Every structure is written in structure tokens, then in C-alpha cells.
Amino acid sequence: MSKRIEHDFLGEKEIPQDVYYGIQTLRALENFHITGIPLKVEPIFVKSLGYVKKAAAMANRDLGVLDKNIAEYIIKASDRVISGEFDNQFLSDLIQGGAGTSVNMNANEVIANVALEMMGKQKGEYEFCHPNNHVNCSQSTNDAYPTAFRIALILKLTAYKEELGKLADAFDTKGKEFQNVLKMGRTQLQDAVPMSLGDEFHAFSINLKEELSRVDSSKRLIAEINMGATAIGTRVNAPEGYAELVTQYLCEVTGLDLKLAENLIEATNDTGAYVQLSGVLKRTAVKVSKICNDLRLLSSGPRAGLNEINLPPMQPGSSIMPGKVNPVIPEVVNQTAYYVIGADLTVTMAAEAGQLQLNVMEPVISFALFTAITYMGNACRTLREKCILGITANAEHTKQMVMNSIGIVTQLNPILGYEKSASIAREALETGKSVHDIAVKEKKLITQEKWDEIFTFDNMIRPQFINR
């Protein structure tokens, strides 16, 4: 295999001639063996780096700090990166030292060498298009990396929000399907008062729909960028008007409503938006996991549990117990939620670790947020497709549990008072008799007509106050 020699201020390295990355990317490959997950696994991040380099070349061209011919080749090369053509050349580990410099240089080197080939030059002939002098013109890792990261987050959140919305809609659909299924509501795992299974599922839907607006709020925070800040926010090496112009071009090429931060020094060291977004992801993960806990409880049994609903059987549940089917989809979503909750702590600690004018821990923040968004999106889709859409209700069983429950005595409070109602409940608990038989037949505390008025389906799921 033919090779080329590239150099940096640490020395020289042999680079395979067929690759588009250069010496700084090679050093990253040698130094950072952490996750084994390369940048190419997040193609949206690669695309976003292409957007940043394209917009920078356009602004530098307009401001006269970059030769127009070189700028046009960088723009064309960036377009090819944006299209995904060179994803396999982005190999830096997602967790790395250097505040993301290796990722930024990976993009600079690939785009430079793609541009060189388009010029009819050889890879590595950087005198014609240099990774630093030309592709990275008017930039620093400290503004290019976080700007690309934020663009990637917004694009990933768009797909994630769609999956979360579909899951919420699936629960709403089931809520309508189960609206006439009477069941027992429970508090602290004890019988409480009757309700509709449909209302329970509708509540799941509302619970998740609340999160959609939280995602939108986080996206607005993430959309504030520091492009043009260069090293620490003082705009060193950037021409007058560059920050505003490159932001304008970024909006055009991405189609996103990006905003230049008011104070670039603050924006370069602040990672609060990531903490906010991570908290939103954690909050949603907690809610989804709680719902999965409920689904596992409601489907428990089938003979010795609640058995109120049936989850779609996905696979045999035991290597020793024939016929056992486990709630594997809620279980895997639970575990995904635990990961996202843990990732939130990673983001929190990394954000807190920022020092002075820069937070060098942004690579682990990017890893945590990218994986959390991806995993939660996958979990929402899996839960919807392989569980929620196929749930059925055991309506007769749930109705029978309601009518045999002691909890229905609560609806006698307005008529009999708390003391008499408690006495009925205690006797029912001790003897196994039904509340109906004790109140109507034995003690004759209420007539059958009054009982029928109180315990209609509608009144049990939408209770109306009934006087004596």
C-alpha cells in the first residue's frame, strides 16, 4: 500500500495514500482507544461538521480572507461530506482528550484532501488547500466543534421528538379503545377506587405529550451558537463581521433557526444548555420507565397476578419453565431508561468540570447526549411497535375485580358516612363477603335501587356526588 508523509509540530507520520484524513486524525486513532465507537457512527455529527466548514468558507470568501477559488473547492468538498460520501473517513473516538480538536481536525483534513483531489492535486499537497490555513480559517475547535455539536443535537432531537410523539399517540389510541373497560384504580399497590382502563392509558399519553414541549424548549437553548468566538470568545483571527455572517450562512445551509450568542466569551465556556437538555431526556426516561413498570404490573400473572391486560407475546420467557412469556419489551425499555438517567449524571459532572474560558469535557457530553437521544428514540419506537399497539384488555376480569373489591365502599361515604363505610370495609375484609351483600342484604343500610344508582359504569369512572 502506497503511503504519503505528513508532518505536524510533533514530527512526521506515514499516512496510507488512499485515506482522506491526515496526521492529526492518525494521532487520535493511536491515542484514544476508549469507546471503540468512531465519529462515523454519528453521521448527523459528520454532516453538521460539513455544514460548519461550508458556512465558514462562504463567510471567509465574502470577507476576502480566503481565496475565492480555494473557498469554492472547500464548499464543494463540504457538500460531499454533508451528503455522507465520506462518513467512513471520520474515525476519531467519540470520547477523546483535547476538547474535540481531533474531531475538528478530522473534518479539516478530510475536506482539505477531498478538495485537493477535486483540484487535480494529490492528497497531502496542503500548499494548495491546507486543513488549518484554509478549511479551519477564522475558526477554532472551541467554536467549530460546539457549533457542529449543537446542529447535530437539533437534527437528532427532531427525529427523537417524532418517535416520542408517536408513542404518546399510541397510548391515546389505546385509551380510546379501552374507554369502556372498568377496572380498579390502585394507590400504594392497594385497591383504591374504580376507573376506566382507557383513562389510565390516556393519562400515559398526556404524561408523555408534556415532554414534547420540553424538547422544544431545549432545542431553542441549543440553537444559540458561538461560531466566530474562535479560541475563547474574543474573536481572535476572525475578520470583522465574520461571526454574524457565518451564522447567517449556517442558517441558510442547515435550514435551522440558529442564533449567535450575545456574549461569545460566556457562550464558549457555558454548557448549561446541555445540562438542560440532558435533564429533559432524564425526565422523559423516568416517565417512560414508570409506565413500563405499570405495564408489567398490569399484565402480571396470568393466573396469579393482576392480569388486567395482555402484552403481545414476543418470545419464550424461560429455558426451564414451559409456557412462560415475559414482558421483555417493557423490561428492555426500563434498562434503556436507566442508561439515560446515568448519562445525565455524566453530562452534569462534565459540565461542572469546565475551567475558566473552556470546558474541555465536551466530547463526553456529546457522547452521552448522542447515545441518550438515540437510545431513547429506539426505546420509544420499540415500545410502540412491539408492545403498545398489540395490548389487549381482559375486560370481564377487571370488572369482576372491581365488584369484588373493598375499595368501592369509598363511594358510599357521602351516604353512610366514613365510620359506617369503614365498618363495612372491615367486615368484608375479615369475612370475604362482598361490600354489596353486607351493605344491601345484611345490614340494609342502603337499598338496591340506591346501590344501582351509585354503581353505574359512568358514575364509577366519572363519579358524581350522590346525596342520601
Image (cartoon, grey):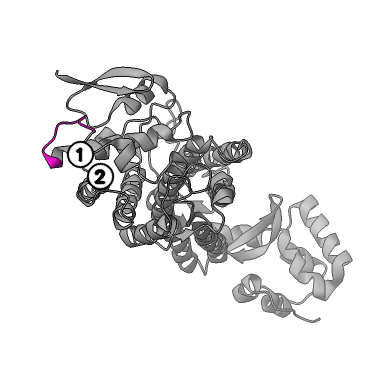
How far apart marks 2 and 1 lie (CA) works out to 9 Å
Q: Does the magenta stretch include residue 121?
A: yes
Which percent across, then down, holds residue 152? 40, 49
**Residue 363 in the image: above or below residue 174:** above
Please state which amino acid type lies under the numbered disc 1. Val
The residue carrying mark 1 is 114
Image quadrant in which you'd find residue 303: top right
The quadrant of the picture occupied by the N terminus is: top left
Q: Residue 81 carries which label?
A: 2
Mark 2 / mark 1, whichever is N-terminal = 2
Label 1 crowding class (10 Å Cα cut-off): few <14, some 14-19, many 20+?
A: many
Which percent across, then down, holds residue 225? 48, 54
**Residue 331 in the image: above or below residue 174:** above
Question: Secondary structure beneath disc 1?
Answer: helix
Label 2 crowding class (10 Å Cα cut-off): few <14, some 14-19, many 20+?
A: many
What residue range appears in magenta? 118-126
Q: Which residue lies furthest to the left in this view?
A: 120
Which percent across, then down, holds residue 95? 45, 31
Please state which amino acid type lies under the numbered disc 2. Val
